[in-house]
Each structure stands twice: as structure tokens, then as C-alpha cells.
Amino acid sequence: MAEKKKRKGRRAYLNDFYTDVTGNTVYTGQMIRYAGEIPWRGAARRTGVLTGAVTACALIVFCLPAPSMTGMNKSYVVLPLILEAVGVLLTVWASVRLLCNGPDLRSYVWEASAKKLPWWLEMTAVFAAVGVVGNVIYLAVKGFGGKVFLSLLVIVLHLLTIAAALFEIRFLRTVKWSGGEELPPAGKA
């Protein structure tokens, strides 16, 4: 029987699977276990709530009929909003993947979820901050258009998105995993 060729690059994790004599696929790679001080359920709940807060704040911003949101022809308003949306989608994807797999993760799942989640949150926070600046510029140039409350609500929701993302990053930096490398300390991503 011919040897299977070893995969390299993005799909290298497939080398950790083999088919046994009964036809079942078996994973033989490294498992990474949650080893935090608080129980897994509490850590999962906190991660889910903070990811939900980031997502809800960003989603509400996308739906508000504020002057800067209805103008949508200014690149300094549109581009940060689009990139913030990408960051939120990647954050939700990583969080769901992390939470659905429980406290024992395969190494490739840990790499794609727990390890990258702080980075996606940083991306979301940065583009939400750029969105605040873009909205302030828009309001300084074009005015409130009679919608002062909605204009200020967009800015406040961007700031809440940033705050929730930073709280989640801070929490994720304290989470310990055994069997794999630890997440870098805050500020050393």
C-alpha cells in the first residue's frame, strides 16, 4: 500500500488524521485543554457575552439612519464601517468555533479560534475608533442634519464596541491553555 503524502502549509493539520481498520477517521494530533482559574462554563459565558456585546453594538450602528450612515458616499465613513464589519464577522466566527468545541480543542482549532480571537477583536476596535473619527469629521463638515441624537448614538455605540472588544481582549489574555503555547501577554501580539 502506498504511503500517503504529507501535506504542507494551510492543510498540514490533515496529517494528524488517519483511517483505522473499521473505517473511522481518528485524530492523533495534539489536544489543547483549557486550564484557566475560573471554570470553563464561566469563561465561555464571559466570552460569549462580550462577543455578543461587540456584535450587537456594531450591528445597531449599521442599522441606524444617522446622517453619516445615510450619506455613505464618504470613504472615511464607509471604509472603516466595512472593515469593522469584517472584524466583527471574524470575531463571531472565532468565538463560535471556540465555544462550540468546548474546553478540549484540537490544536488546529485552537490556532484558528482562541489564538486569533484577540487579534480579530483588536482589528474590530481599531476600525471602530477610525469610524468614530470618520463620523466626527462628517459631522464637522456636513452637520447633524437635524438628527443630533442619532448622530451621537452612532459615536457612543462605536465607543461601546471599542470598550467591549478591549474588555474581551483583556480577559482572553488571562486565559491559560495547557498542551500548547500560551497567548502572548497584553500588548505583545
Image (cartoon, helix red, strand yellow):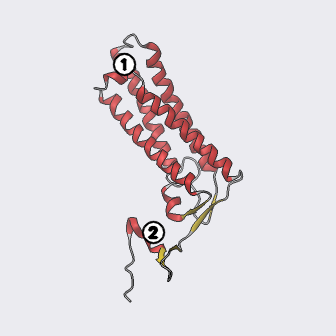
The amino acid beneath tag 1 is Pro
Residue found at x 33% / y 31%: 78
| Percent position of residue 49, x then y | 59, 40
Residue found at x 38% / y 67%: 9
Residue found at x 36% / y 24%: 69
| Percent position of residue 63, x then y | 41, 27
Position of residue 124 relative to residue 9, above or below, is above
| Neighbours of disc 1 within 10 Å: few (<14), some (14-19), many (20+) | many
| Percent position of residue 181, x then y | 57, 62
Q: Secondary structure at mark 2?
A: helix
Number of the label disc, if any, that sits on residue 94: none
Residue found at x 58% / y 47%: 186
Q: Residue furthest bottom?
A: 1
The residue to which callout 2 is attached is 13
Q: Is residue 189 visible?
A: no
The residue to which callout 1 is attached is 67
Mark 2 or 1, nearer chain start? 2
Front position in the image: 3 or 166: 3
